[in-house]
């Protein structure tokens, strides 16, 4: 039985940052994740994707963000159960939670924070008859290593942030980039839309709207696609087609834990601490929902901070916090070491 103060289900950015905030409050953390390494989607799906909305970082790669978060929480020595999925939870008579994984590993904690991101997911695929023939032979749904596309002819299909961001990024690597979207309007950030339009105006990418990919061609690997643009069919030479139509998320076993669910997300009380309908179980990051919810890493960090404050009060109702600054006191880990940290706050425990 693994015992801890705060059990975090999900080791993505939000889950990792929760370790830091909990550590400042002297709460020991343990994380469970179905992936074999920390980082969630940032590490597994798009480690080389640039992220632009992390404070103090005009641009940071997703994988680099995870590395920095791991460095930040290292003084607090979190525990990990990786490559295993949390499948069941039960409350004990003494108000503890027992969480068991699909491998039978049991964890005990007075507080559980679900930071599972989008949960388990699969890519939304375009309705093309011979799509399966070219999967891994030219059709990719996830970009793990951008170098794979260096000096290649790349076609990206989609109209959201991922399609726009990867168009901007891969234009620097690929021999040609074509972005295809079935509508003239995009769903992504306005700044990204402007950048893509500027690349088109400069002749650095091809932008086809409204248009759809209708056929794939090639003997053993993808060589060409057919595009329908306003009723006119034409062919484009193509080494890689990257359909970025989003992911279909599933909560998995967590959906059967008695939590209040709305549109495949866990409802929480955002007026105070992001607690679920079950006292002692919280949900933070993309896995939760509440009025005005934004699925941003930045928002997940905020939710993790308030969740940890509530968790501390639940675990230590007899203690209170006094505000101090890490710029003065540093960050003291559980091994007694002190790491300098700038511009964040620490609560010392009386």
Image: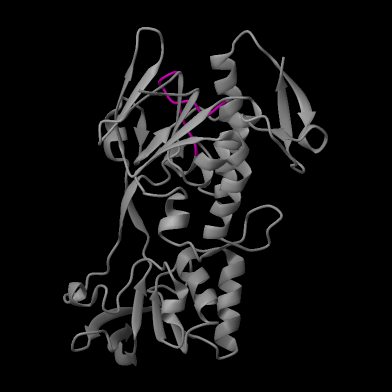
Residue 266 image-quadrant placement? top left
As rendered, which of 176 and 213 lies closer to the eye? Answer: 176
Does 274 lie within the magenta span? yes
User: Where is residue 345 shown, x and y percent of the image?
Assistant: 73, 34
Does residue 213 sit above or below 9 in this rendering?
below
- Predominant secondary structure, magenta span: loop
Residue 195 among magenta residues: no
Task: Quarter of the image for the N terminus: give it.
Answer: top left
| Nearer to me, 107 or 151 | 107
Q: Is residue 263 left or right of residue 111?
A: left
Give me the residue at 76% from left, 43% from top: 342
Query: Is 221 left or right of 140, judged from the image as shown?
Result: left
Residue 37 seen by the camera: yes
Give the quarter of the figure containing the C terminus: top right
Looking at the rendering, the stretch of residues picked out in magenta corresponds to 273-284
The residue that appears at 47% across and 56% down in the rendered structure is: 42
Q: Residue at x 63, y 54 (%)?
A: 54
Determine the residue positioned at 32% across, 51% down.
Answer: 121
Q: In which image quadrant can residue 85 be found?
A: top left
Question: In terms of image quadrants, where is residue 276?
Answer: top left
Is residue 293 among what the camera can see? no
Residue 32, compared with residue 279, is above or below; it is below
Q: From the top left corner, tell me how far across and down residue 197 is, in percent.
A: 57, 79
Residue located farthest toward the right when viewing the structure as drawn = 328
Residue 211 to residue 22: above or below? below
Residue 311 placement (x, y as % from top left): 55, 22
Provide residue 198's location: percent of width, then percent of height. 60, 81
In the image shown, does 269 or 8 lie closer to the viewer?
Answer: 8
- Viewed as shown, does residue 30 lie left or right of 67? left
């Amino acid at each position: 039985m693994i015992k801890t103060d705060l059990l975090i289900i999900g080791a993505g950015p939000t889950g990792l940052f929760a370790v830091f905030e909990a550590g400042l409050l002297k709460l020991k953390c343990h994380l469970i994740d179905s992936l074999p390494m920390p980082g969630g989607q940032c590490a597994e799906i798009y480690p080389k994707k640039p992220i632009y909305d992390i404070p103090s970082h005009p641009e940071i790669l997703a994988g680099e963000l995870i590395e920095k978060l791991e460095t930040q929480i290292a003084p607090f020595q979190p525990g990990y159960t990786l490559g295993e999925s949390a499948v069941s939870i039960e409350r004990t008579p003494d108000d503890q939670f027992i969480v068991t994984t699909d491998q039978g590993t049991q964890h005990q904690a007075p507080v559980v924070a679900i930071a599972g991101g989008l949960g388990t997911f699969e890519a939304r695929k375009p309705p093309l008859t011979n799509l399966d023939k070219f999967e891994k032979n030219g059709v990719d749904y996830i970009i793990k290593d951008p170098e794979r596309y260096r000096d290649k002819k790349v076609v990206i299909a989609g109209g959201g942030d991922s399609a726009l961001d990867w168009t901007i990024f891969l234009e620097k690597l690929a021999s040609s980039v074509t972005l295809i979207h079935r509508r003239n309007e995009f769903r992504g950030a306005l700044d990204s839309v402007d950048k893509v339009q500027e690349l088109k105006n400069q002749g650095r990418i091809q932008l086809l709207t409204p248009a759809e990919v209708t056929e794939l061609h090639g003997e053993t690997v993808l060589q060409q696609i057919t595009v329908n643009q306003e009723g006119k069919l034409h062919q484009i030479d193509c080494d890689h087609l990257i359909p970025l139509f989003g992911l279909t998320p599933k909560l998995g076993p967590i959906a059967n834990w008695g939590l209040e669910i709305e549109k495949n997300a866990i409802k929480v009380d955002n007026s105070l601490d992001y607690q679920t309908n079950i006292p002692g179980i919280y949900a933070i990051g993309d896995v939760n929902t509440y009025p005005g919810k934004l699925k941003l890493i930045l928002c997940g960090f905020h939710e993790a901070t308030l969740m940890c404050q509530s968790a501390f009060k639940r675990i230590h109702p007899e203690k209170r916090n006094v505000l101090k600054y890490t710029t003065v006191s540093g960050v003291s880990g559980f091994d007694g070491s002190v790491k300098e940290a700038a511009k964040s706050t620490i609560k010392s425990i009386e």
